[in-house]
Each structure stands twice: as structure tokens, then as C-alpha cells.
Image (cartoon, helix red, strand yellow):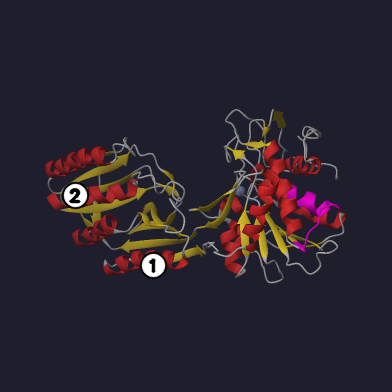
Amino acid sequence: MTAPVFKGLIMGVLSNLEPKEVFGYFEEICGIPHGSGNTQAISDYLVKFAMDHKLRFRQDEAGNVVIFKPATEGYENADTVMLQGHMDMVAEQDPDCTKDMMTEGLDLFVDGDLVGARGTTLGGDDGIAVAMELAILASHEAEHPDLECVFTVGEEIGMVGARALDTSDLKAKYMLNLDSEADGIFTVSCAGAARVVVRFSGGRETLAGKALKLTVGGLAGGHSGEEIHKGRANADIVLGRAMFEISRKTELRLVEASGGTKDNAIPRESSAIIAVSDVKAAEEAVSELNHNLGNEYRVTDSGVWVKLEPAEAEAGFSRELSERIVCFMFTVPNGVQVMSADVEGLVQTSTNLGQIYTEEDSVYFSFLTRSSVNSQRDETVERIEALAAALGGEAEVGSAYSAWEYKADSKLRDTMIEAYKALNGREPKVEALHAGLECGILSGKMPGLDAVSIGPDLTDIHTPRERLHIESTGRIYKLTIETLKRLR
Ligand SMILES: [Zn+2]
């Protein structure tokens, strides 16, 4: 092993853990700062590993590294296998932790069956994948076909490494992604996504009537993929509904609107400055809406409220443009669109109005649409575009990535299920995710790729409470080794 070059690493904290080689590499990785966007050092560490082990490799401009290892004896004619994980981690720390995660390694500790890092995230997501891949690349015992080990950067900040990766020289027919967090669950499909931003613009006019601030708050929010089916309210959508209800009772003019901070989160707060001709009528509309929301979201989002208060404003959009914007907000598709018929309980297609913002004479609406069926993602995007066009808005579609669609025939999945049963004496669960994984981007670039995602138990990822489960790590490593052995 190479000597650590960063301070903060206490060598040997994990040295008694099994599998020794996996935890040895994991500890080395934890000594190198590798938060998303700060991955040059870890990328160079992987290059040095490849050179030290005389393995062919390439490092691209983004910082992704691919290391190639030839097939072992008897596997020369077997199909190539990709092992894949991301080298970046979410760098989060407790408020009282003084560590500089840009320059210092982590302070690891072992607590029973758990590994953690004092005061910070551990980066078991996805450092443990990197460690397992290095252990296999360094191994003289493991039997396997030609290997392509793909280490990406920036997974946690929009999968930028996977997007940038050139796959034209990769021959893999199978891909084992090691970025899941639950032992015993095989993920075999994930959603693709597309962003749509709709803009409405127009000149401003001097306002008649009384300016008011309309605020929506008290919502639970949540992840726009994994929690979209929980029946929670979307603050931006409630804002549109409130304005629509007000506009039915009195003339409404929009001055500005804002809500939400990210496309991939269900917004918890939103607000608008409006002007109305009849304040009392607007208050009645809001009071009735509060009553209805309390009833509709009694179980799923009971804290939601809408509030009106006096405000100051001089100029707003015309009555006609205000009506078009309010109509768009009131009718645009949002939330779960279609449930899967293949996988029980899986959301197949959804869309989330994640952000509203106003810049000068334009109001913007930003959506993230997800689907495990690419054509249905496109259909939903087109529906938003069509509605925007009919109401005089402009839509721009950006940063789309493909779904990782469920494969009815998968030799890799079948092989892994058999390997899992042989090792553990029980069946794994086979699941699909309504969220993005790098498998979506890579299988989009490599048509026909047969992929499964697994990983050891990792709890509270992306928080300083993150813990990696030791025994589970051993099981996943054995499963990986056994799978490679069976792909002859
Ligand atoms: Zn991850």
C-alpha cells in the first residue's frame, strides 16, 4: 500500500476488519479528501494504483478513471464485466466539527459492526465500492473475465462524471454497479429524468388595487423521486391554486412569485406578491382554501397553510398575462402520473414543479420529470411544453438522461440471484428505483448493457451519522467475487 499523504489519517483503525484488503483500501481512501468537486487527489491516487499494479488505465479531463484488468485463466472468452462506483462523496459535517474536509482526511472509528467518521460523513457511499474494486484489481486469487473498473467523479452533484465519460472503448456486456445501500436488494431499473424550464414574460404596468403577499408554508417536502408518491403537498402548486381561487372572486394581478430551491425536492415554501381589487374577497378565498387543504392533507401533510398579508408594489404584469400564468400553475401536471404495471408499488412516471423564480419581466417554472420508461418521460415533458405554448409561455428542455429500463432477460441478474442463494441460503429482493443512478446514464450510452446494482448496508448516508456495516460489506464482497467467478 502507498503511504498516506494527507494529515488526519490514523493508520490501522480498520486493520482488524474482514475482508482485510477491502477495509485496507477503504482506510486509505478515507485519508484522502474527496468531497464532490474536490476529487483530483483521489483520481490521481487511482492512477497511481493502476501504475503500481501495472494495469492499463485511462483518466479523462473530468477526472473519471477506468482501470482494465485482463481475464484470469479460463475466462479469456467470457464477456467483459464492468465494475462501477463513484469516487466522490457528500462532504457534510456536524456544526461543531472543526475539520477542514477540503484538506484533511477522516477520523474513522469502529463501533461494534459499524464504521463511522467522527463529526463527518464517512463516504461509504461510495468509497466502499472503490475499495472493493481495488481489492479485486489487486487480487491474485479472484477468477474473472476481462474487467473494466469505472470510477466516476461528481455523482452526487448531478452525475457529471458519468455524463462526461467516453464509453467508446469499453466492451463490457455486464455492469455491476456498487452504489446501492441495502444488502439483499438487487436494483435492476431506475428512472431517467428531464428538466423543463418554462418562462412567461411581459411588460409591467402600474397597479391599481391593493398589493398583498400570499405565502404558502408548513409543508413536509421531500425527495422528488423517492417521496413523490407520499401524497404530500407541493408549495408551488398550492400557490397556483390559491391565486386561481382568488382570481375567481376578484381581479388579480401578479407582481412576482417564488418557491422551492431545487428541482429534485418537493418545495416546502412559496410566495407571491399580487394586487387585487377586493381584499375581502381574496381573504375569503384563502380562508376557504385553508379549510379544504386541512381536510385534503389531514393525513399526508397536515401542517400546510396559506396566508395573506399587506405588501408594497407599484408595477405588475397585465391582467391578461397574470391570468395566463395563474392558469398554467393551476393546470400543469404535477406529482405521480403513472404507476408501474411491472413492479408493484413503483412510481413509473412523475413530475415535480421544483422551483419558481422571478427575474425582471419574466417568471420561471422549473420542473424535473422522471420515468423508468423513456417515452413516457418525453410524453410528460411534451405535455408541459404544449400547455406552456398554448398559454403563451416558452419551454426549454435541458439535461435529460435515460431511464435504466427493466430487462426481462438478464443473465447477470439470474447469475447473481443464484450466487446470492448459494452464499446466503435465501433469495434476494429485486427492486426498481424511482430515482436516478449512474446505471441510467451508462446504459443509455451502452445499449444492451446488462446491469445490476448492489451494495452493503449503509445507513444515514449524506449525514455525519453515516455508518457502514462491516459484516454486510463482507457479504457483498463475496457476492461480487462469486458473481465474477460464475460469469465464465
Ligand atoms: Zn452514491
**Which type of secondary structure does the marked residue at label 1 adopt?**
helix
Percent x, y of residue 14: 77, 34
Horizontal side, residue 256 vs residue 79: left or right:
left
Span highlighted in magenta in the image = 132-147
Compare residues 123 and 176 and report the one nearer the observer. Answer: 176
Q: Which mark is residue 288?
A: none
Count neighbours of disc 2 (C-alpha within 10 A) and say few if under 14, some if 14 to 19, many if 20 or more: some
Confirm whether the magenta stretch covers residue 226.
no
Q: Which residue is denoted by mark 1 in the rendering?
A: 379
Three-letter amino acid code of the residue under disc 1:
Glu
Q: Split into 4 quadrants, where in the image is the C terminus?
A: bottom right
Percent x, y of residue 127: 69, 46
Residue 28: name its quadrant: top right
Up/down of 198 relative to 306, above or below: below
Percent x, y of residue 33: 71, 43
- What is the spatial separation of the Cα atoms under label 1 and label 2, in whole angstroms? 29 Å
Is residue 295 visible in the rendered image? The answer is yes
Report whether the residue tagged 1 is closer than 8 Å to ligand 1: no
Residue 302: name its quadrant: top left
Q: Which residue is denoted by mark 2 in the rendering?
A: 245
Up/down of 75 relative to 301, above or below: below
Three-letter amino acid code of the residue under disc 2:
Glu
Tell me which residue sits at (60%, 27%) in the image.
96
Q: Nearer the viewer, mark 1 or mark 2?
A: 1
Q: Split into 4 quadrants, where in the image is the N terminus?
A: top right
